[in-house]
Amino acid sequence: MMSVRIIVVLAVLTGVTGSPNVMIKPEADMSAHPNSVPETVEETEIFGQQNVPVLVGEEAEEDVMATGELNPNHYPAQRAAKVVQHYLNTRYGSPYRLFGLQRVNSGNAEDVADSGRKYQLEVTVQEIIGNTTEKCSAEVLFPRGERQGSAQVQASSWEELLKNDTEAQEEALYQEYKMNQSLVTAQNLPDSYGHIEPDMKPLWHLGFVASSFVMLNESTENTLYNMAQVANVTQLPTENDQLKFDYHILLHEMVSQEIIHWKLLFTWSPPEGVKVLQMEQLPHCHHCEKPPNTN
Amino acid sequence: MEKKTRTFWIVVFKLLLVEGLESTRSYDYTKYHSMDEIYRWMEDVERGNPELVSSAIYGHTYEERNITLLKLGLQNPESREKKVIWMDCGIHAREWIAPAFCQWFVKEIVNSYKTNKKLEQILQNVDIYVTPVINVDGYIFTWANDSTRLWRKSRSTPPPGSGCYGVDLNRNFNANWGTVGVSFDSCSNTYCGKSAGSEPEAKAVMDFVGKLVNRTLCFLTIHSAGQLILLPYGHPEISAPNYNELVSVGKAAAAEMKKLHGMNYTVGTSPQILYANSGSSRDWARLIGIPFSYTFELRDKGEFSHLLPEEQIKPACEEAFAGALSIITYVHDKTYGTLPNAAVTTMTTTISGVAMTIWSTVMVVSLTIGVLM
């Protein structure tokens, strides 16, 4: 009888601990102790091509090569799609028309021999000011190797994005700035509280468009750019019927988390759009980081 | 004489109480507040709600300012040991919406716990520790003038040979420190410090939470921007053992967040949806054994980034609250066995499954014995 009792107890124990549905509080994950990063991890690049074997998870595997069908929510497709946003703003942006990337619906990447890596993307783009959205197909080529230079973008089915009629507003703004007795200046758009005075908004939008030229130029598979702030606007005398501006803008680069300063000289008119004459990166001012109250 | 004195002090006490309550009600949660205002607000909230709120100073910043938390919890009738939920905001100085959310969170709890039975139950079982601003020095620096608004790091003095201040506190925690997504250049915005936990702000969190780890259900760290819910780990080759559950709980939170204002929050590990990184507070929490650990990256997706307009504070906080509460409710119910119907069915199935296992084991054993005999 004793042995039967023992058997029953053992059986109960087996039943209880063997059941996969019993909730056991997970113990500390000892296999991921701070000191147990596998020694085979080399000093490879953090993103993009990964030569180090993936230990766990199918999720990680599909990003290792970032080739073939891409997860639209993962960073490779997202970074490429952001470049499409910059491209659209350089081509079609204005003080009353701005594009934002709303979502990536699907993506595909392949290596193109001797050229670089090409992404094919289906994205949903938002026209921010009119608050409309449109689906759009695009191709982004990040050059590699022999061919340097910035990303090349082609987009199709974007015409619908231009459906909001901005002609009248653009013309009115153009005339106002052309006829002004004094040249416009502005700082900190938006300010520290995210605020922009309504009559300054077109200047902020213009900054968005102009900075998109820089962001398009500077973008790689390892960057994600957004404009953080227009630090300073100085209107210069109109030339050849083009309004002319000198802008100091701050870009936020997400991967490095750095704020990068650029000076931009550009013109704008409704028929010509934004044309950048000069762009210059400003050095990071380390000595500016001292506490404000000390000498 | 005595009675008059007593009445006087009763009146004073009531006035202080009312003033405390009123100051929390008149505090504008839809505006960004300076650190002085936030310190004063913490005192007011504690004074106005002594049965729910207490405070603790658990460390000091590099410039020797207090790092203060508010502990939200109710006495439970049986004086059972309470579990812990941790929430911190403002590790990165320029992410102003994060401290705004921590304040909003406290306000919501204070305003609703008396009329929300579920919340009352949670607060009786769990203490929620909220740190509105961890990187106090950095936060104050972002208020100094227009040129400092986008500062990210702490304000530690430059190391020898360098001119640059500050350490990225979210790269300084003892979790695969210094391996990926960091810089060893002190001028960089992802400078991870001279060693894991070298920074007093990070050390304060690790020391305090380290003592509570066995009771801690969940660790939430609030940042901006990007509209993401990040799960451990930041290292691309390490996966949390409860990855699947972390994803499903994260996705449930994102679904709750979307219901409010239609905003999408993407769920995944940092290497999947953002970038690889190491030394984050989220990773440290998971590594020491806290089962649920998330980084919330609040609004927006690049239009304003860290300079989120004040008129977006309310909607951003409403959706973040829904997401945080979703996770808090889940981890509470998982521990206290008050899961909804689906889980009850699972329990029943579990019991019958266990019974079947026992029965079949007994049958096998007795048959074996029978054969042997």
Image (cartoon, grey):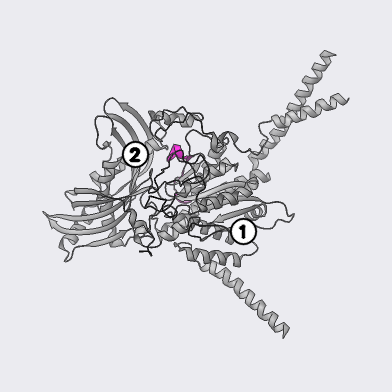
Q: Locate the C terminus of chain B and report the quarter of the image it occupies.
A: top right
Q: Does label 2 lie on the same chain as label 1?
A: no
Compared across the picture, whether B147 is left or right of B100 comes to: left
Place of residue B217 in the rendered image (x, y in percent of width and height, measured from the top left): 61, 46
Which class describes the residues within 10 Å of circle 1: few (<14), some (14-19), or many (20+)?
some
Q: To which residue does mark 2 refer?
A: A81
Q: Name which residue lies at 40% across and 59% down.
A: B142
Q: Which residue lies furthest to the right in this view?
A: A1
For disc 2, the chain is A
Query: Does the magenta run of residues contain B262?
Result: yes
Q: Under tag 1, what secondary structure? A: loop
User: In this picture, which residue range is highlighted in magenta?
Assistant: B260-277
Q: To which residue does mark 1 refer?
A: B113
Q: Residue furthest front?
A: B160
Residues tagged 1 and 2 counted as in contact (Cβ below 8 A): no
Given the image, on which type of amino acid does mark 1 rest? Tyr
Place of residue B169 in the rendered image (x, y in percent of width and height, measured from the top left): 47, 49
Place of residue A210 in the rendered image (x, y in percent of width and height, measured from the top left): 24, 49
Which class describes the residues within 10 Å of circle 2: few (<14), some (14-19), or many (20+)?
many
For disc 1, the chain is B
Q: Under tag 2, what secondary structure? A: helix
Rendering quarter of residue B69: bottom right
Given the image, on which type of amino acid does mark 2 rest? Ala
Q: Name which residue lies at 57% across and 65% down.
A: B45
Place of residue A263 in the rendered image (x, y in percent of width and height, measured from the top left): 24, 52
Q: Name which residue lies at 71% across and 31% down.
A: A17
Res A66 seen here? yes
